[in-house]
Amino acid sequence: MTKIHEALSSPTLKLLLGLHEGGEDEAHILKHGWMQHVEDRLQLWIHSDQEETLRNRRKQLHQIGTAALDAFLQSNVTGPPLDWYPADLVFPPSICSEPKKLRDVQCELVRDLSEDGEAVYKLISYPELFCLAKCLLNHESLLTSDSPSHYRWARVTVNFWHQKLLGENAPSLQETIYNDLDQSAESINSSSSEEKALRLVQRATIHTQHGFDAKARDHLRWAAEESGFEFKLTGRLGKRTKFQERDLSQLVVLAKSAGSNGSTNTPENMNGSGRESPSATKIASQPEALDLNDDTLLETTAFSKTHVNTSSLEETGISPSLAALDPSNQPTLQPLDSIILLAYASSITNTSPADGLTREETLP
């Protein structure tokens, strides 16, 4: 049993939804809707006169809401498919046992997720998971002044995914998301460098979704500074075809994570303790690249081995550590640095799509 399934099958959730001891509220669900049913039950369950009890219930709400969101993203975005059926955990048995009732409730949940006249993608799997996460993580009890900062970040995340599910951005959701970002700005400054870089990447992704590409690139640059990540889009001489007689300038991204020695990570590379480094293990598990088998193109760009003139580095803005990299044999990046690089590519928008690439064509 995974942690996600364990959280969603907990007695706390059964009590919250009214599924404990055979208690069912089918009539209330069919009359007022399942989301309204959850909100009504939540209002009764969350309040307590004892501060310790209230704090524990807030923690449980956050854990269950996060688990529901993770399960939804696993089933709709990242995979693999869930090996259990979420409806059995959140709906009364009388609804789960009748396919038509279940389908009607799920269709109503999809309609309830509409915002500012914008409908969500109607073919999403298990909308009950997202609706549960939306109800729990947006509850006012998680947003008090003494609540941990990650409670507000969880709300930002679920609302941002709600925005992504819509056909077009909803102004009301955008306002809510950016209000939460403003209130969480102080918590970023007090975070560790790694967490700060992660939060900056999240903010950049939100900016990209809402069309603020310049802000997104600024946040990605700050995230790179926090993580010690260096990258530069530049040119190097090389050949792309088998029949080229002279080297031509080729567009290339030079990238290097903090602490990298500039050599390619291979399974033979060991760390100081004599064991394989995590990056080496990752390289060994990567799928093998397929050959192009093209009559004209080379399998990979053949970069020339000409020496880089250090006097020109200052003019081009390339650091000596990046200039020393072999473009065809670069070191493996840390996962967060890879995300920064991909997010930077996503933030690039051509302002004249008729004369060049559209956003869809520049996505990584």
Image (cartoon, rainbow, N blue to C red):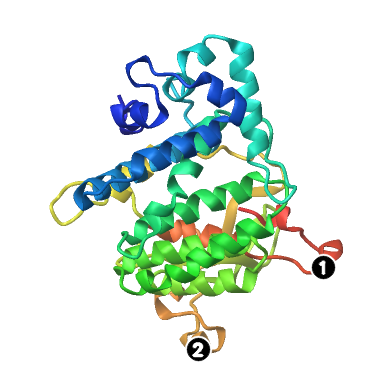
Q: For residue 352, which numbered disc appears in the image? A: 1
* Left or right relative to 196: residue 218: right
Q: Which residue is mark 2?
A: 314
Mark pair 1, 2: CA separation: 31 Å
**Callouts 1 and 2 close, C-beta under 8 Å:** no
Amino acid type indicated by mark 2: Glu
Q: Foreground residue, 344 or 132? A: 132
Residue drawn 29% across the image and 68% down it? 192
Q: Nearer the viewer, mark 1 or mark 2?
A: 1
Q: Quadrant of the N terminus?
A: top left
Q: For residue 16, which numbered disc appears in the image? A: none
Q: Position of residue 293 (x, y in %)?
A: 65, 38
Which corner quadrant of the image does residue 256 belong to?
A: bottom left
Q: Look at the picture and state if 356 lies above or below 22.
A: below
**Residue positioned most to the top:** 97
Residue drawn 54% across the image and 36% down it? 36
* Left or right relative to 256: residue 315: right
Q: Look at the picture and state if 17 lies above or below 58.
A: above
Q: Residues within 10 Å of mark 1 (few under 14, many from 20)?
A: few
Q: Position of residue 103 (x, y in %)?
A: 63, 19
Q: Is residue 243 visible?
A: no
Q: Residues within 10 Å of mark 2 (few under 14, many from 20)?
A: few
Residue drawn 82% across the image and 62% down it? 353
Q: Position of residue 151 (x, y in %)?
A: 37, 55
Amino acid type indicated by mark 1: Ser
